[in-house]
Amino acid sequence: MPDEDMIRVLGPIDVLTPTGPRSVGSHHNRALLAVLVIAAGHAVPIDQLQAAVWGDKPPQSVDNSLQNYVSRLRHVLRRQAIVRVDHSYRLVACRQQIDALRFEDLLLAATEVRSDPEQCRTLCLEALALWRGEPFGELADGDPFRLETMRLSELRVATVELALETEIALGRHEIAVAELESAVQEYPFRERLWYLLIEALRRDHRRVEALRACQEYRNVLASAGLDPADEFRTLEHSILHGGTPNGGFR
């Protein structure tokens, strides 16, 4: 595929070209491309591809049908983008040409420069900008995409957490608080988000609100019969007894 094109699976599946998004065709085409993307350059056996596209209801001429869908994808990407390897097919694309892999690379790079909040924040925001919705679009809840959808979604939340950590480190407490208050509503059992919210409130000298947030999180956990971790208890105790903000984050 052309170097400037990008296969996008962090949302509805398509191909982004210099002139705009390009459809890859039918539901079956999207499923076939998604499986090849998940394999990320490794050969995928034909029977595995057929199962992903048709499940347990393949057409009578399943081999010919699969070849037709491969041909259609080659027309969208370019012929050399999908190669036959014995009884398998393999997608040929660099990591920059697949948004999910580009996202993971940016997250890794951000993690490696965590000590530089400004650079870390820039990389996190670039990574999050690749997201347009649920991974794999309408395929997200089906096999074999469900587990990969969950993995990528978990990485997205981790990226959000890292980006908000940098906002706090850069002293942008009000911005961080506003975003974190929304985030804990969306992910009420993510202790890391609550920790960051409470830390941001404390650094913004909003001690009463920080303690209120501590109690809110305790209530969330209690509703599920859970208790907060030791780190959370330490943070709460520090705020309650007038401790000073931490210099960093766990």
Image: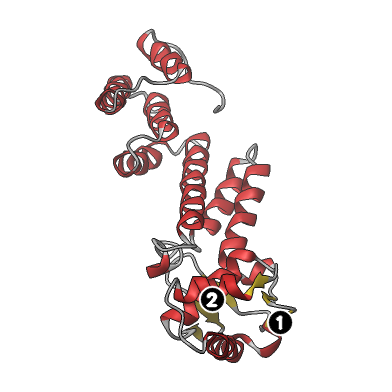
Q: Nearer the viewer, residue 231 or 122?
A: 231
Extreme-top residue of the structure: 241
Q: Is residue 153 above or below residue 48?
A: above
Q: Is residue 203 left or right of residue 4?
A: left
Q: Is residue 137 above or below residue 195?
A: below
- The residue under the point 38% across, 7% down is 241
Circle 1 sits in a helix, a strand or a loop, which is it? strand
Extreme-right residue of the structure: 86
Extreme-front residue of the structure: 60
Task: Say what amino acid the circle numbered 1 marks.
Answer: Val
Q: Is residue 180 above or below residue 121?
A: above
Please identify the quadrant where the C terminus is shown: top right
| Rendered location of residue 247, percent (x, y) | 56, 23
| Rendered location of residue 79, percent (x, y) | 67, 89
| Label disc, if present, on residue 83 of the rendered structure | 1
| Rendered location of residue 18, percent (x, y) | 56, 84
- The residue under the point 58% across, 64% down is 38
Circle 2 sits in a helix, a strand or a loop, which is it? helix
- The residue under the point 29% across, 23% down is 225
| Label disc, if present, on residue 50 of the rendered structure | 2
Q: Is residue 182 left or right of residue 19?
A: left
